[in-house]
Amino acid sequence: MTAIEQLTNIVSGAKRIVFFGGAGVSTESGIPDFRSVDGLYHQKFDYPPEEILSHTFFMQKPEEFYRFYREKMLCLTAKPNKAHLTLAKWEQEGRLRSVVTQNIDGLHQAAGSRRVHELHGSVLRNYCMKCGKCYDVDHIAESEGVPTCTCGGVIKPDVVLYEEPLPEDTVMQALDDIRSADVLIVAGTSLTVYPAASYIRYFGGDKMVLINRDSTPYDKIADLVIHDKVGEVLSKVDAAL
């Protein structure tokens, strides 16, 4: 039996799937990841991306932060790919309980998914650090330098930077769903970014499936491992259901 056939059988018998995804889910939409050979962490910048995307750097050098952020983090022409579209379809069919994502691009919602736990926030939301007023992503993209609010405060993207905690309410909802899932599909993630990677340990259901281009530290405990593109795998499974 092929891996696709095995996954098709798992999905067809599932009643409460939770999908846990990382950057590899969005690379098929043209959004670069961080840790692969061609990822952002292997490109040359004035400062290391890990430093630029930290709370300290944002507070100390906001103009440098926004120069990098607009150029590398805002991929506003990206469209949902086969993975996003398949997951939205499974949610509508009642197979999928929710999506837990480390991505900040909003593509799951753009595809039609409604229950999405964004562990690291979203580039689509921004807020004034002084008065809390909200701004959309177009305001950030079209502004120059450090975007400011009508009150004069600095606007910050609603994304979790290094040194910042994950949103507690979102984390608790995600963990509740992972705990109650009968199938957990983990895809497009190296499972090396903590604390998010540790959340799959809360799964106690029937089957855990890993779909990723490269090996992960959790391959040995998964019930099924597929080293391939996420969108290709999910779309083939959906066609076979």
Image (cartoon, helix red, strand yellow):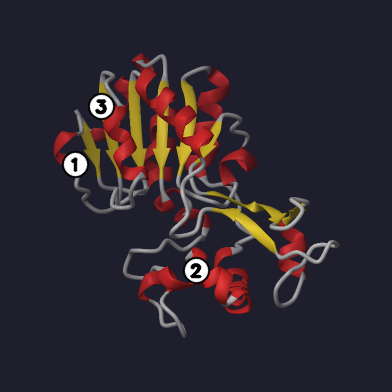
User: Which dot marks residue 117?
Assistant: none
Residue displayed at 30% across by 52% down: 190
Q: Could you tell me if residue 86 is visible in this image?
A: no
Report the side of 174 relative to 201 (left or right).
Answer: right
User: Which dot marks residue 6?
Assistant: 3
Q: Nearer the viewer, residue 66 or 39?
A: 66
Q: Pinpoint residue 238: horizontal percent, then vertical percent.
A: 44, 29
* Image quarter in which the N terminus is found: top left
- Give the label, 3 or 2, closer to the camera: 2
Residue displayed at 77% across by 69% down: 142
Q: CA distance from mark 3 to mark 2?
A: 46 Å
Reading the chain from its start, which is encountered first: label 3 or label 2? 3
Residue reaching furthest to the right: 150
- Give the label, 3 or 1, closer to the camera: 1
Number of other residues with Cα within 10 Å of mark 2, as a class: few under 14, some 14 to 19, many 20 or more: some
Reading the chain from its start, which is encountered first: label 3 or label 1? 3
Q: CA distance from mark 1 to mark 2?
A: 35 Å
Q: Which residue is mark 2?
A: 56
Secondary structure beneath label 1: helix
Number of other residues with Cα within 10 Å of mark 3, as a class: few under 14, some 14 to 19, many 20 or more: few
Identify the amino acid type marked 1: Asp
Identify the amino acid type marked 3: Gln
Give the image quarter of residue 45: bottom left
Report the side of 33 relative to 128 (left or right).
Answer: left
Secondary structure beneath label 3: helix
> Is 125 placed above or below 8 here?
below
Q: Could you tell me if residue 159 is visible in this image?
A: yes
